[in-house]
Image (tube, rainbow, N blue to C red):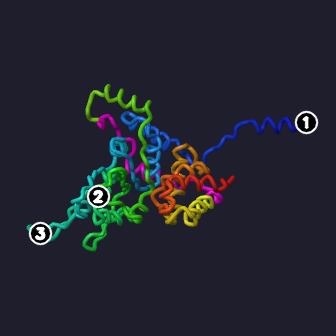
């Protein structure tokens, strides 16, 4: 009886985990970034978390939402918290690839062509309304997003790290827009859908705006991380532990998208790698050096929603990519 009581007492005690990796500095940096962004942005916690995860996982992010929900402002604030190069490109129907990448100009003095770098040669690139430019201009981003390099006139130009693209688009207004092709979408780690704020958040937004003394909302934002620290934390993320049964769980989710009757197109291996890397980063910002099934479930939606295509029949019935992904996650057995 005494032995049984001792067992019961030991079972009641909370289990404490000791991290193999020291994540305190990373957690403190993430908290400071959130505090800096929180000086302006009310709510939108998931969007901010996913943007920070995308930096740590070294992936690009597509932000979609109706006008006025702080997509561009949040991306600019996040870039301001990073002591690295920043450029913003406003995509328009008349924008040419050379406007983004740069062009070779003949120098009369030297009698040689000189390459003038475009705005893509930076660290954080904010592309506003990416679907406003035609396919030719969108395609100019393929190489730089996938390989972190640009080949012009047969010469490879290696980009400085970090190189991260944050792109915004409006899902409502379709006139004068050009939908991104699947190959382009697949290069984004996340697609974040930004919702309207709640009534409480709306009130807080109005009060903040009323009390703000300066019109420049970026002036009080301070840098938190530099390029060296970002690279250091990205390397740390690669060391986060993920057990084999969780790798199998990720593979099962992806395999289900390829054999799902509700889907016309399933996810590629790039999607499974994206889930694994982003779940590691999400675990790290939670203070853990190991991935849990909840981390995988959390990142699966923004990783997959832009990589799958709902079958026409199901789309007519009102099914969405998000709904089908949720069904897949709920159907699969969670590994223990």
Label at residue 317: none
For the point 54% across and 49% down, which residue is it?
A: 298
Disc 1 to disc 3, C-alpha distance? 94 Å
Left or right? Give the position of 160 relative to 116: right
Which of pointers 1 and 3 lies earlier in the amino acid sequence? 1
Q: Any magenta on residue 184?
A: no
**Label 3–label 2 contact, CB within 8 A:** no
Q: Name the residue under label 2.
A: 120
Disc 2 to disc 1, C-alpha distance? 71 Å
- Between 131 and 176, the one lying in front of the other is 176
For the point 36% across and 61% down, which residue is it?
A: 180
Q: Name the residue under label 1.
A: 1
Residue bounds of the magenta highlight: 217-246
Q: Percent from the top left, x then y, of residue 136?
A: 28, 66
Which of pointers 3 and 2 lies earlier in the amino acid sequence? 3
Q: Percent from the top left, x then y, of residue 46?
A: 47, 43
């Amino acid at each position: 009886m005494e032995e049984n009581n001792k067992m019961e007492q030991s079972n009641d005690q909370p289990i404490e985990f000791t991290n193999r990796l020291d994540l305190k500095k990373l957690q403190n940096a993430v908290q400071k970034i959130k505090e800096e962004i929180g000086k302006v942005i009310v709510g939108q916690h998931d969007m901010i978390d996913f943007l920070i995860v995308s930096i740590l996982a070294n992936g690009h992010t597509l932000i979609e939402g109706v006008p006025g929900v702080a997509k561009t402002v949040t991306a600019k604030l996040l870039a301001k918290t990073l002591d690295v190069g920043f450029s913003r490109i406003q995509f328009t129907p008349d924008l040419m690839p050379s406007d983004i990448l740069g062009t070779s100009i003949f120098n009369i003095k030297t009698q040689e062509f000189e390459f003038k770098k475009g705005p893509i040669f930076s660290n954080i690139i904010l592309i506003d309304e990416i679907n406003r430019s035609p396919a030719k201009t969108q395609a100019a981003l393929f190489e730089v997003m996938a390989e972190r390099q640009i080949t012009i006139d047969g010469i490879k130009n290696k980009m400085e790290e970090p190189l991260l693209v944050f792109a915004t688009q409006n899902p409502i207004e379709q006139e004068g827009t050009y939908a991104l092709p699947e190959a382009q979408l697949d290069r984004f780690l996340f697609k974040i859908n930004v919702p309207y704020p709640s009534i409480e958040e709306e009130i807080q937004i109005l009060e903040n705006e009323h009390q703000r003394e300066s019109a420049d909302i970026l002036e009080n934002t301070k840098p938190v991380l530099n390029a060296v620290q970002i690279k250091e934390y990205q390397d740390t993320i690669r060391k986060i532990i993920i057990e084999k049964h969780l790798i199998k769980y990720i593979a099962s989710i992806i395999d289900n998208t390829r054999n799902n009757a509700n889907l016309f197109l399933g996810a590629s291996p790039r999607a499974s790698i994206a889930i694994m890397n982003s779940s590691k980063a999400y675990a790290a910002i939670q203070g853990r050096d190991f991935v849990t099934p909840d981390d995988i479930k959390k990142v699966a939606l923004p990783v997959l929603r832009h990589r799958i295509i709902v079958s026409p029949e199901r789309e007519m019935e009102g099914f969405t990519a998000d709904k089908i992904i949720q069904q897949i996650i709920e159907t699969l057995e969670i590994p223990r």
